[in-house]
Amino acid sequence: MRYARTVADLVGSTPLIRLNHVTDGIAATVLAKVEYFNPGGSSKDRIAANIIDAAERDGLLRPGGVIVEPTSGNTGVGLALVAQQRGYRMVFVVPDKVSEDKRAVLRAYGAEVVVTPTNVEPDDPRSYYSVSDRLVAEIPGAYKPNQYENQNGPRSHYETTGPEIWRDTEGRVTHFVAGVGTGGTITGTGRYLREASEGTVRIVGADPVGSIYSAENDDGVHGYLVEGVGEDFWPGAFDPSVVDEIHRVGDAEAFAMTRRLAREEGLLVGGSSGMAVVAALRAARDLPADAVVVVLLPDHGRGYLGKVFDDGWMREHGFAVDTPDPLVPADLL
Ligand code: PMP
């Protein structure tokens, strides 16, 4: 019989899918590594088992323990898939810009969810970092994986995402493009691809306008709406020396591309995927036909139906809406 022992065994081995329409006018091959094929729906499934295994090995997580983590949603789902199987309870702390849908998903997997304000300094007692520290101190048996500093994050991508891309492109990948959140994806995958290619693969980061990674100075650090990427501090999971170039992408272009990916490529993905594709197309613009650009799309779009895919929400936030005039007569609408 052919079956998975648990759903967590199905993490990884996500497909590469060629982009055919948004790439108009580009000679290079642009391949999307579509991470929503992971069972929890995002690239974050990859880091969960390694993080929990290491914590058990180091005696930080014991039977009956509680996993407490500040997460924008996807890391919570990844951790939940593994934690459930091993009998741990979960408390996740999310900033209030994270959609109600995503919070509901975490609760559905059996976690408790604490919501904190987005626009406060990291050292403010209300911030999602401070609140999670307090919960770790107060809940017996609590363990905080801290994905921002945990080296098992980049290690997971070094061990899985990088080798998959190298194998599936038969070593022909020339550029790797990814958004930077904790930095784990670009650090681990980039490091592997650089080593495997003996330094020829170019590593391209994508960063929201307002994030610290591509800000000219601290004044340029401000809020933005795309979720899961960008930061207002430098996490230890990110090694900037792995990145050759970084492109700043605004919310408006990231969201417009996210909507095009759903309508033109059949890929219903989140806003950070649209952001990464904008950066990938910029990097690919002047490349020759034999270049192979791989862009990582971190998560599914279903968690954003009330946001980037909702015309009302888009207009409310001042973004253009490209929905064509309806074919359906007005009396039926
Ligand atoms: N996009 C989304 C939607 C995410 O949840 C994350 C993870 N925070 C990222 C991109 C960035 O990945 P990483 O943390 O590995 O840099």
Image (tube, rainbow, N blue to C red):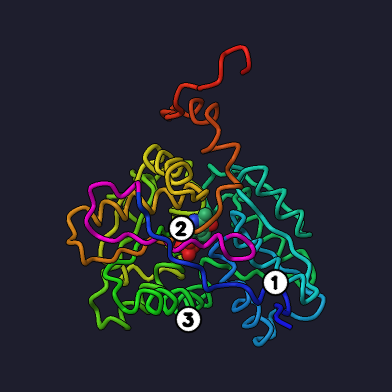
Q: Within 8 Å of ligand 1, the CB of disc 2?
A: no
Please tell me how crowded label 3 is: few (under 14), some (14-19), or many (20+) other residues with Cα within 10 Å. some
Q: Residue furthest top?
A: 331
> Residue at 72% of width from left, 48% of height from top?
104
Q: Position of residue 48 (x, y in %)?
A: 61, 72
Please tell me how crowded label 1 is: few (under 14), some (14-19), or many (20+) other residues with Cα within 10 Å. some
> Residue at 49% of width from left, 59% of height from top?
298
Q: Which residues are magenta?
A: 21-41
Mark 1 and mark 3 lie on one chain; the one further toward the N terminus is 1
Residue highlighted by disc 3: 159
Q: Give yes or no for residue 104 being in the magenta stretch.
A: no
Q: Give yes or no for residue 24 being in the magenta stretch.
A: yes
Q: Position of residue 71 (x, y in %)?
A: 60, 58
Q: The disc labelled 3 sits on which kind of residue?
A: Glu
Does the CB distance between marks 3 and 2 fall below 8 Å? no
**Mark number displayed over residue 7:** 1
Q: Is residue 120 above or below residue 167?
A: above
Q: Nearer the viewer, residue 235 or 227?
A: 227
Residue highlighted by disc 2: 297
Q: Position of residue 59 (x, y in %)?
A: 69, 85
Q: Quick check: can you spot residue 293?
A: yes
Q: Nearer the viewer, residue 152 or 2?
A: 2
Of badges 1 and 3, the one in the foreground is 1
Please tell me how crowded label 2 is: few (under 14), some (14-19), or many (20+) other residues with Cα within 10 Å. many
Distance (Cα) linking label 2 and label 1: 21 Å
